[in-house]
């Protein structure tokens, strides 16, 4: 087999793998976002497919929660009294990959006045995807290590993977309280009616809901923190 055919076959396999992975991620996100708010009535009741949940509008008391982190720490809403709270429901989806760095930046800037609580399905799933990218990149490097010219298309694919790799590395090392939706932790998803990824709930230091939405709620949190504590 010629070098050019060898390169083409390898690139085709990589592109197919990346496309299938992206389709799977987008399919998951689309399926989750179908769980939509069906009705909001005059009694401030939100009707969802999983039941009727009250009191999730701005100004309402946020539902209490008690969570156990991946590292074993525990936290409840009462522990956060006096601090703004940003609940961040994230996962392996395009939206989370895009906004994650902004959430990290906001936390690092205002961590003295902002408690971030991350909620995700499976850290192991994130790690497996990260490991797969590492394996793919290592295979490319090994394949062409003894050749003077690395195919341009491989540089492009590797570059895309490098961006994703760095994002996943940051996800695996979030500086805040991160927890998985297992055991008693699952209750928070129903209590706050998460509609997909990434989903945010922004809570005041007094325990009142300020915003609850997709990226829009994150930017409410960002604007609030910048307004009150920005320099």
Image (cartoon, rainbow, N blue to C red):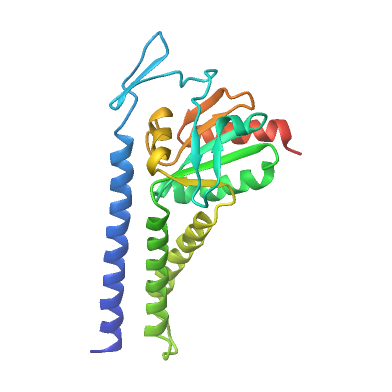
- Residue at (29, 65) in percent of width and height: 17
- Residue at (43, 39) in percent of width and height: 185
Q: How many labels were placed on the picture?
A: 0
Q: Quadrant of residue 192?
A: top left
Residue 27 in percent (x, y) is at: 28, 47
Question: In the drawing, does residue 73 fall left or right of residue 81?
Answer: left
- Residue at (34, 24) in percent of width and height: 37
Question: In the drawing, does residue 102 fall left or right of residue 24?
Answer: right
Residue in front for this viewpoint, 107 or 187: 187
Q: Quadrant of residue 89?
A: top left
Q: Quadrant of the C terminus?
A: top right
Question: In the drawing, does residue 78 fall left or right of residue 17?
Answer: right
Residue 10 in percent (x, y) is at: 29, 77
Q: Quadrant of the N terminus?
A: bottom left
- Residue at (26, 65) in percent of width and height: 16
Image position of 79 with respect to 8: above or below = above
């Amino acid at each position: 087999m010629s070098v050019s055919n060898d390169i083409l076959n390898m690139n085709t396999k990589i592109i197919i793998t990346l496309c299938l992975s992206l389709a799977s991620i987008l399919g998951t996100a689309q399926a989750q976002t179908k769980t939509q708010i069906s009705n909001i009535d005059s009694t401030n009741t939100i009707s969802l497919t999983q039941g009727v949940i009250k009191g999730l509008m701005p100004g309402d008391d946020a539902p209490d929660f008690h969570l156990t982190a991946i590292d074993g720490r525990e936290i409840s809403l009462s522990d956060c009294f006096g601090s703004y709270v940003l609940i961040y429901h994230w996962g392996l989806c395009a939206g989370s990959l895009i906004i994650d760095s902004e959430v990290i930046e906001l936390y690092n800037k205002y961590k003295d006045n902002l408690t971030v609580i991350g909620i995700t399905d499976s850290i192991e799933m994130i790690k497996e995807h990260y490991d797969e990218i590492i394996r793919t990149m290592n295979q490319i490097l090994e394949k062409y290590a003894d050749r003077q010219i690395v195919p341009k298309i491989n540089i492009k694919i590797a570059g895309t993977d490098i961006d994703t790799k760095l994002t996943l590395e940051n996800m695996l090392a979030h500086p805040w309280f991160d927890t998985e939706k297992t055991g008693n932790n699952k209750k928070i998803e129903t209590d706050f009616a998460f509609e997909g990824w990434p989903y945010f709930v922004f809570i005041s230091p007094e325990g009142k809901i300020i915003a609850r939405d997709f990226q829009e709620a994150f930017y409410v949190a960002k604007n609030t923190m910048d307004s009150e504590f920005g320099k």
